[in-house]
Image: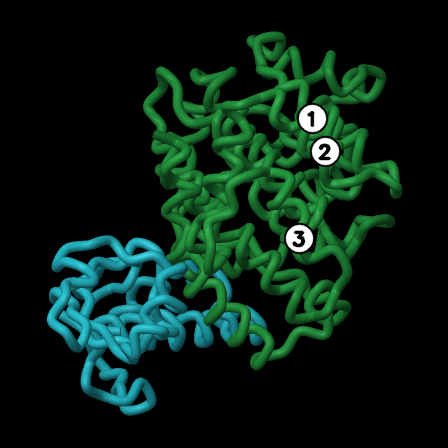
Amino acid sequence: MRKISLKEIQDGMVLAQEMQDDKGRVLLKKGDLLRSAYKSKLSQWGIEEIFIVAGSGGLDGETPNINPEDVKVTTAIIAKYERLLEQKFCDFPDNVLMNTIKSVAISNLAHKEAMKNAGF
Amino acid sequence: MNSTESKTNPDMAEMTDTERLKEIIEKLDDVPSLPTVVAEVNRAIRNPRVDANTVGQILTRDQALSAKTLKLVNSAFYGFPHRINSVTRAIIVMGFQRVRNLVLTASVLDKFKGGNVDFDFSSFWKHALGSAISAETLSQELKLQESEDAFVAGLLHDIGKLLVVLYAPEKFVRIRAIVNKKNCLIIEAEEEVLETTHSTVGAWLAKTWQFPPKLTQAIRMHHDPQSVREYYEMTYITHVADIICRALNFGDGGDKKIPKINDHVWKALKLDKNILDNVMKKTLEGFDKTKDFLQLLQ
């Protein structure tokens, strides 16, 4: 389950909790499919935030509780990609441009894996 | 035909591309044509005064192709907040060029999604899609014109490999055996078996399918970019995109190697480490959103 603001609503998200107005009338049921077009109506009802099923509407799941900038790329992940690209680049050990391409690729691949491991 | 090929077989210099390729690819006459609406859309958008409705009407004559195009339009890759329900609407939102390119993408993916051969089509198209995203991102980063065309150049740069796989399967088996034995680039094995390469074969197909000349040229010259005299930007971008995509390990380029980047291209495009870093980052992000493209193969 994940709390989002109205502006974050996307087509295909699934509502995780029943929604009622202040008189207890059911507005939307748990499991209802959300549409971005609902934003204005929900806003008129005074609703600012809703709970959706994590992973619905194209989201990958719960948002991790850490800042993306704090994700650490470990030496083990870097070493994994160094090994992976070693054979591909083995014909150009001293070529400056190919070494640049290799190091930028390793850094990006390793960063992506670290982000994925952290839940992003 | 380049000078090396002329030297290896002087008789071939006298023959047309098609005649020469027919000697290499026995079943060349079986190569499919693209749906007729693709050519009609190409013709229509050459008229600067054409409107979205007219092109939309042409496209909807082919319902299956329109549906596939709309699937790509509405893919996570473009991330529109609302679903786009008609090709006319897609043209208004995305422009003629981009929609034309998606029509082309959908048609080619549909024509070459598989066959009765031992070949991993999905890995091939992953490499192609990675190159497409990388080519478009690179041309945007370098602020070049017509970056949307770079996507198609990246996507189709290796299309000649599929022609060999599907229409000369026995020769492809020999090519793959050489690649595995010598651990070389596929282009070197192709020279040995075919006396030509997938670049030449792909350019023939692009010409046959009446692709724009700059696209044909990019396909033909992406392994020899320095020899290009016209449309050089598109060729340079395709050359670099292929290398970026192989460095990022997307799919399968046909071998376990990586071609050497051309120094002249690096300088001419004024590439540097920061640009490369941005392009790789955005390419990795974009590649994650291409599931809908690969679903067209199923």
Q: Secondary structure at mark 1?
A: helix
Density class for disc 2 (Cα within 10 Å; few <14, some 14-19, many ≥20) is many
Density class for disc 3 (Cα within 10 Å; few <14, some 14-19, many ≥20) is many
Image-based side of B168 in relation to A51, left or right:
right
Density class for disc 1 (Cα within 10 Å; few <14, some 14-19, many ≥20) is some
Q: Is residue B183 visible?
A: no
Where residue B198 appears, as percent x and y from the top left, is 59, 33
Q: Residue at x 64, y 36 (%)?
A: B199
Q: Where, quadrant-wise, is the C terminus of chain B in this rendering?
A: top left
Q: Amino acid at mark 1?
A: Ile
Q: Which chain can be seen in green?
A: B
Which corner quadrant of the image does residue B226 belong to? bottom right
Q: Amino acid at mark 2?
A: Val
Determine the colour of chain A: cyan
Image-based side of A51 in relation to B7, left or right:
left
Figure check: B214 above or below B120: below
Image-based side of A46 in relation to B84, left or right:
left
Can you tell which of label 1 and label 3 is closer to the viewer? 1
Mark 2 — residue? B55
Instruction: Check chain identity for marks 1 and 3: say if they share one.
Output: yes
Mark 1 — residue? B58
Q: Amino acid at mark 3?
A: Glu
Subunit under mark 3 = B
Give the alpha-carbon distance from disc 3 to disc 2, as whole Å: 18 Å
Report if the CB atoms under discs 1 and 2 are less than 8 Å apart: yes
Q: Residue at x 36, y 66 (%)?
A: A41
Mark 3 — residue? B148
Q: How many marks?
A: 3
Q: Earlier in the sequence, mark 1 or mark 3?
A: 1
Q: Where, quadrant-wise, is the N terminus of chain B in this rendering?
A: top right
Quick one: B153 or A53, which is closer to the camera? A53
